[in-house]
Image (cartoon, rainbow, N blue to C red):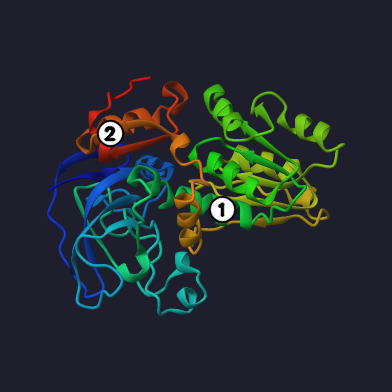
Amino acid sequence: MKGFVFHGPGQAFWEEVADPGIKEPTDAMVKVGVVTICGTDLHILKGDVPEVRPGTVLGHEAVGEIVETGGDVRTVRPGDRVLMSCISACGRCSYCRDSSYGQCRGGGGWILGHLVDGTQAEYVRVPFADLSVYPLPGTVRSEDAVLLADIFPTSYEVGVLNGRVRPGDTVVIVGAGPIGLAAIATARLFAPARIVVVDLAPARLEAARRLGADAVADAHEAPRQLVADLTDGLGADVVIEAVGVPESFELCTRMVRPGGHVANIGVHGGPATLHLEELWSKNVTITTGLVDTYSTPTLLRMAAAGRLPTAELVTHTFPLDLMEEAYEIFSRAAETGALKVVLGGEQHEVAVPTA
């Protein structure tokens, strides 16, 4: 089979790899039907995630068909169409018993495309299948469901819920990539008074407006002043960091009101300054986190009911074997307008956009 293999910073290729097999009785082997690329994959290619070893197949978001299961798997069987979660859960450790699957100490957590071969391949071995794949209802397209593998639960859990968005809040989201856009959609479930989105790319700010942002701001054009004007100088109730660079984190901490929440989602490859000389007296809560995906069943029900704007985030589609081209488009999002790229599925007949 073929997979997208990481060979070190800046080096990854679609190439022949060994077929995965069932290694543990809790494993499932899945034929990949639809897969996507995450901003975290770009962080890996930049060298920001050093624990990813050369030779690893990347990817942690996919939908596919079960082709084989280990003897202990009970919830799925060959032929089932399933969503593969970005998080694997052993189900036995203390963290899993508390639904904190991202912190699993029994061999799970974020392992696909990180510590073991991932989903950007023709086939993938999924550990702990009973808790790590989700059978899909026939009403949910694979191209929509794949966005529930990571970005929607991440935005919802690590951004909206950790940030404690409440009715009437002013919510600022810094970063209008897929995670930031999904944060708009899920923050709106809590009826905030307004959502303000900050980004550098005009195309992404326009996408933010389409998804429900009440105001947008170019990151270079005084977003702090806009937030101050909208809140009578107080600051935002919740600020969600969805970029992962020091400048965006510091901007978030300077736009939050006293007693407010900063929810950091972005993957940081380097240190960011925490300005305690400004924050120590403001009673600000700062949260970080790896998604646990405990919300995936809820989000799947919402997707089946047509309550999540998944299709609106997909801008580019490719056949699976054009993985390298898909990465090139996704990595130049400011130029290409890429939000979420999807490979495989019905879009084999769709022309590949180049800009």
x and y, in percent, of residue 227 in the image: 76, 35
Front position in the image: 342 or 261? 342
Residue at x-position 35% and y-position 50%: 61
Q: Which residue matches tag 2?
A: 347
Instruction: Estimate how packed mark 2 is, as few (under 14), some (14 to 19) or many (20 or more) residues with alpha carbons within 10 Å.
Output: some
* Any part of residue 128 in sight: no
Q: Quadrant of the C terminus?
A: top left
Q: Position of residue 38 (x, y in %)?
A: 40, 43
Kind of residue at disc 2: Gln
Disc 1 crowd, CA 10 A, few/some/many (<14, 14-19, 20+) = many
Q: Specify the amino acid type for callout 1.
A: Tyr
User: Which element is circle 2 on?
Assistant: helix
Residue 156 numbered mark, or none? 1
Looking at the rendered structure, the secondary structure element under dot 1 is: helix
Q: Looking at the picture, does residue 88 appear above or below residue 177?
A: below
Q: Is residue 186 left or right of residue 141?
A: right
